[in-house]
Image (spheres, rainbow, N blue to C red):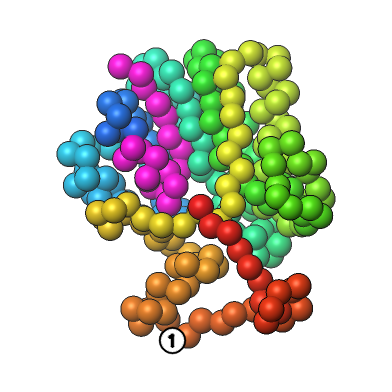
Amino acid sequence: MYKILVTGGAGYIGSHTITHLLQQGFDVVSIDNFSKSFPDVFKGITAITGKEVRNYTIDLRDLEATRSVFLQEGPIQGIIHFAAFKSVGESVAQPLAYYDNNITSLLHILACAKEFDVHDFVFSSSCSVYGNIAQLPVREDTPLGHAECPYAATKQMGEQILRDVFKAHPGRMILLRYFNPVGAHPSALIGEHSADQPNNLVPVITRTAIGRQEKMFVWGTDYATRDGSCIRDYI
């Protein structure tokens, strides 16, 4: 059976991806240290799929601990790398933490991919790699702009690292540059639930609606729109 390692498996996109993979018959292994997520998400995945998720609670910055997963699991055919810190504001306040976590984790998972002969790799990048966009619509071949925060910089660096690694060690690699993903599984057993205070609009709306926070604010008054507020597209 095709075995896929999903890093950041308890995260928002990671948990939905694991659910889909299990429903499609893949053997899935997760790595998540719950620094930005909750273990209970795996109960939701099990309730949806009827399958238990094997998760290793390790920090990808620990190379030997990361190697141990590959040694214990045997042949892994593909890696989907979601694990990363992702708050723009936090990255500005704590740039060293973001460079250390996001880049070191990627280097270690790629080192293991090379050592254990894994040739299929999906990297969770970000629309932030485009910087301040000068022209719409944005396409895959739109030139990358200046990274406006350390988080965006780690994603630009990550993409370049992957290009260099896969040029030297050929395989199949794809970069995912999301624009504002929202939503939850139709069962509502898993959704967007971060250990941090949410900064994304939709979680703020829902938390306010159910009374978990008192109010929400709409920022921005000088955009080129009817009322000066920002217009966003969502996936």
Magenta residues (range):
1-20
Question: Is residue 98 rendered to the left or right of residue 13?
Answer: right
- Residue 4 inside the magenta-drawn segment: yes
* x and y, in percent, of residue 194 in the image: 43, 60
- Quadrant where the N terminus lies? top left
* x and y, in percent, of residue 231 in the image: 63, 68
- Residue 122 inside the magenta-drawn segment: no
* x and y, in percent, of residue 164 in the image: 73, 23
Which quadrant of the view contains residue 156? top right
- Which residue is painted at 74% across and 36% down in the image? 141
Residue marked by disc 1? 214
- From this view, report whether residue 160 is shown above or below residue 43: above
Which quadrant of the view contains residue 26? top left
Q: Quick one: 65 or 43, which is closer to the camera?
A: 43
Q: Callout 1: few (<14), some (14-19), or many (20+) C-alpha neighbours within 10 Å? A: few
- Which residue is painted at 69% across and 38% down in the image? 140
Q: How many marks?
A: 1
- From this view, report whether residue 189 is shown above or below residue 139: below
